[in-house]
Amino acid sequence: MSVLRWPPALLPMALLVATAFNALPAWADGPELLRIIGQDKQFVVQTPTGPFTITRTMTVCARNKGFLQPLVPLPGVRPVTEIEVLQALNDTGTMVIDMRDEDEPLEATIPNSYHIPFNELEDRMDEMGCTRKGKGPWDCAKAPQIVAFCNGPVCPQSPVGIASMVRAGFPVTKIAYYRGGMMDWEALGLTTVTGNRPTHK
């Protein structure tokens, strides 16, 4: 029985071939399935020819591992498109807020937007025009309109942030939600900038 011996100069190539063969079972399993709604990674549609399963995998566009968000995260919140976001950027009575939980400066965001991470909103209500005495409830009667966004249609951060704002006393009628977020903004070729407009503390 003959034994295959690799010349020393070809040993790195042999190692590469062995690694590739070891990876074959992972390829056979297919791409990683991402969440669609909540924890579910599959959605079954009943077609005339029988059940058909819809899945979601990572692509150049679907670069976020979150899960699909509703168009209206809370009753009373207004969904907006890029057109309304663009108009809001020039409205002195509106704050467009990037609610992604990322370090500053953000590498790419919507020009003239503010950055308040979703998990800091309740502690920074004063930066959104709310006031309070001591530890009392927030008074947001004079607060501006808010347009909230994060990574995109599968990002739960801004919906969670909106819920925390409303829980803390911010009027839901003053909140708009740009579900498309950065994913849609960049896919449409709209301009982005590094860093954000500072809030008034």
Image (cartoon, rainbow, N blue to C red):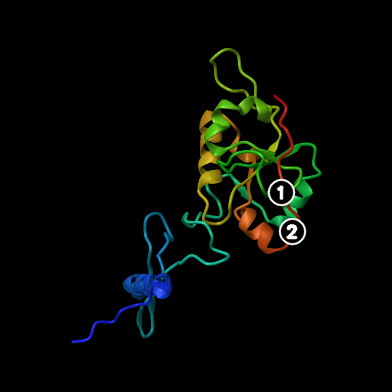
Residue 139 is situated, as x and y percent measured from the top left of the image, at 62, 23
Earlier in the chain: of badge 1 and badge 2, it is 1
Residue on which disc 2 sits? 190
Numbered circle sitting on residue 66 = none
Q: How many marks?
A: 2
Identity, as a three-letter code, of the amino acid under mark 1: Ile
Residue 190 is situated, as x and y percent measured from the top left of the image, at 74, 58
Residue 65 is situated, as x and y percent measured from the top left of the image, at 47, 56
Q: Locate residue 152 relative to residue 128 in the image: left or right.
A: left
Q: Quadrant of the C terminus?
A: top right
Q: Locate residue 35 relative to residue 135 in the image: left or right.
A: left
Of 18 and 193, which appears nearest the observer? Answer: 18
In three-dimensional space, the C-alpha distance between marks 1 and 2, rounded to whole angstroms, equals: 9 Å
**Element under disc 1:** loop
Of 199 and 71, which appears nearest the observer? Answer: 199
Numbered circle sitting on residue 110 = 1
Q: Quadrant of the N terminus?
A: bottom left
From this view, report whether residue 152 is shown above or below residue 116. Answer: below
